[in-house]
Image (spheres, grey):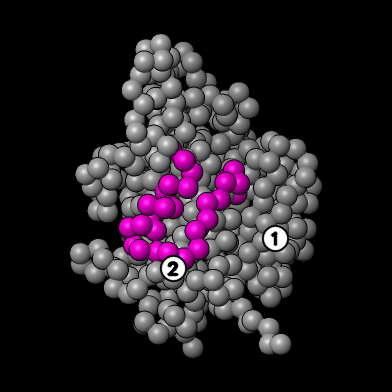
């Protein structure tokens, strides 16, 4: 019996909605320039909150190219961001005409999308508040149960483009974005679809969401008067993360499918793996053992050695324990070169967007591979000897054959992608 041969998977489109910009290319340019979207959040009361900062996407800036009328009114905020990011990726991939309609039959294509909270805070809580205020007499919107659920973002994308293929919704905390892209990668690699839209989205502006992380002591509370310095991954005085939000989507395509239609190819996704720390629901395994396993397994999936990795786009959320655990994992998985390979974290640019982070950061990694340019890690003023990595402090060109993208999250979740440079020759 002939075994099925895995297919090569390439990235042909990128879409981003972030606090920096509502397009992928503009976000990338601002990340390279060292800008940040972290600002004082208007709805965080200093009498209640210790952290007053967030990296918000402004609603007025979100394009409205794909949803309108009733469909727009009945869509959660996270779905609107996901739809626009997916649409941008489709345009970028040359899959839509001037009327934003598919130029090829997409019935075999699918979506792998993820988020942590869906519209629970934006939609469900607001209805519950009215229910309490009106002693149970509040009018419940008839579309409530097809607005807030986690899977509706992915459904909306598939309906918009007539995609009847694989459909999955990933919920693995802060590892979600990379894991959703990995699941999409696997769907193409193993012949379940010729093309997948893959990524993640998150809406985090409800004040209660921030309070939960404040109670966990996970947020930075020492920089309310200096937002620019609040997120400082790997820095010795890092003091927690800043919430962000947005959406990142990629078009993943089987190589021959992409070549046959003359698609522009950014890079190749070559490997993917997940693991669990099996240690603690909040704290990372201090030695980085679970994360190291994900890195090692992703390299094995890609069929490459640690010696071929020239760059790491780290999860590094600016937490004291998490950044050190990741540094340990890098050294375990990549060996002696682990302390020498250029490492960057871009969370200082658009905060920690929960599920969206892995997708936004993978989108930036796609540009890194395509342009052979490593973006800086913001606010590197005090190197941490316990971290001991070659943290990139200035955006710089580099020769990158392959790189890893890491995403780690609550519940011990780890997801790692391996990206390779695309050489047409």
* Residue 42: % across, % down: 36, 25
Instruction: Work out how far the residue at label 1 is from the one at label 2, CA to CA, in angstroms.
Output: 28 Å
Position of 52 compared to 130: left or right? Answer: right
Residue marked by disc 2: 109
Disc number lying in front (1 or 2): 2
State the mark number for residue 295: 1
Above or below, 293 against 316 in this view is below
Q: Is residue 45 visible?
A: yes
* Residue 69: % across, % down: 21, 44
* Residue 362: % across, % down: 51, 58
State the mark number for residue 271: none
Residue in the image at 27% along x and 54% along y: 66
Q: Which stretch appears magenta? A: 148-175
Label 1 residue SS:
helix
Name the quadrant containing residue 311: bottom right
Residue in the image at 68% along x and 83% along y: 3
Position of 225 compared to 416: left or right? Answer: left
Query: How many residues crowd around disc 1 within 10 Å: few (fewer than 14), some, or many (20 or more)?
Result: many
């Amino acid at each position: 019996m002939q075994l099925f041969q895995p297919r090569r998977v390439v990235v042909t489109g990128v879409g981003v909605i972030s606090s920096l910009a509502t397009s992928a290319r503009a976000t990338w340019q601002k990340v390279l320039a060292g800008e940040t979207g972290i600002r004082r959040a208007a709805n965080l009361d200093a009498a209640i909150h210790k952290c007053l900062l967030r990296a918000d996407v402004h609603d007025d800036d979100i394009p409205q190219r794909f949803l309108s009328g009733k469909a727009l009114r009945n869509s959660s905020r996270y779905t609107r961001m996901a739809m626009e990011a997916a649409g941008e990726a489709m345009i970028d991939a040359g899959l839509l005409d001037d009327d934003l309609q598919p130029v090829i039959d997409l019935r075999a294509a699918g979506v792998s999308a993820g988020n942590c909270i869906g519209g629970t805070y934006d939609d469900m809580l607001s209805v519950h508040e009215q229910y309490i205020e009106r002693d149970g007499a509040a009018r419940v919107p008839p579309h409530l149960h097809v607005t807030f659920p986690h899977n509706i973002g992915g459904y909306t994308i598939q309906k918009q483009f007539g995609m009847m293929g694989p459909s999955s919704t990933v919920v693995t905390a802060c590892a979600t974005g990379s894991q959703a892209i990995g699941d999409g990668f696997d769907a193409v690699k193993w012949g379940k679809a010729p093309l997948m839209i893959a990524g993640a989205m998150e809406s985090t502006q409800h004040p209660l969401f921030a309070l939960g992380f404040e109670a966990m002591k996970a947020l930075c509370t020492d920089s309310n008067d200096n937002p620019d310095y609040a997120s400082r991954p790997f820095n010795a005085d890092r003091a927690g993360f800043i919430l962000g939000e947005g959406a990142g989507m990629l078009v993943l395509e089987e190589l021959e499918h992409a070549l046959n239609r003359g698609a522009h190819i950014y890079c190749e996704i070559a490997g993917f793996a997940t693991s669990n720390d099996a240690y603690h629901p909040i704290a990372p395994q201090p030695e980085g053992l679970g994360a190291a396993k994900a890195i090692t397994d992703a390299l094995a999936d890609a069929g490459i050695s640690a010696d071929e990795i020239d760059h790491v786009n780290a999860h590094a959320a600016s937490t004291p324990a998490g950044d050190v655990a990741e540094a340990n994992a890098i050294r375990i998985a990549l060996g002696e070169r682990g302390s020498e390979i250029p490492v960057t974290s871009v969370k200082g640019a658009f905060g920690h967007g929960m599920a969206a982070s892995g997708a936004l950061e993978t989108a930036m990694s796609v540009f890194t591979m395509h342009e052979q340019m490593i973006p800086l890690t913001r606010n590197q003023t005090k190197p941490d000897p316990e971290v001991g990595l070659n943290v990139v402090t200035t955006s710089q060109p580099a020769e990158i054959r392959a790189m890893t993208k890491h995403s780690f999250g609550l519940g011990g979740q780890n997801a790692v992608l391996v990206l390779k440079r695309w050489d047409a020759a």
